Image: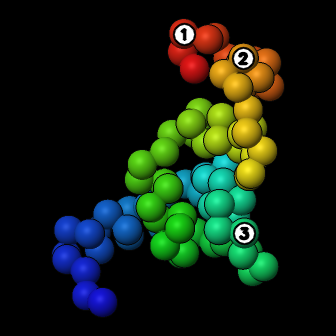
Amino acid sequence: MQISEKARKNIDAIVSGPRRDIILELGQMITDRHAEVKVEAPEYWGLATLITDEMAEVCLKMEVRKPKTFEQLVEVTQKDPVRL
């Protein structure tokens, strides 16, 4: 697959920028890979461009295949319900 020059520049900026460990952790949780998700992985690129660290923090509290109510999320994240 060939990607555009603009997309390549965005990817390069993400890869060369500061490493966001919380995004790596979320990528690992979502993909459930046996191999470690790294900054160079497409999962990281996609998440790093779309998700803030705060959003990733909430996602990690949600867990995989464990439904939670809004009230439970407020409790586990300790976030203001209006902001959440």
| Furthest residue in direction left, as rendered | 5
* Amino acid on which the number 1 mark rests in the picture: Val
Real-space CA distance between mark 1 and mark 2, rounded to the nearest whole angstrom: 12 Å
Q: Position of residue 2 (x, y in %)?
A: 25, 88
Task: Check residue 32 in the rendering and tell me which mark sits there, or answer none.
Answer: 3
- Residue 45 seen in the figure: yes
Q: Which residue is mark 2?
A: 71
* Amino acid on which the number 3 mark rests in the picture: Asp
Q: Position of residue 21 (x, y in %)?
A: 68, 54
74 vs 48: above or below: above
Q: Which residue is mark 1?
A: 82
The image quadrant of residue 37 is bottom right
| Furthest residue in direction bottom, as rendered | 1
| Quarter of the image where the C terminus is located | top right
Looking at the image, tell me whether mark 1 or mark 2 is earlier in sequence order: 2
Front residue of 64/2: it is 64
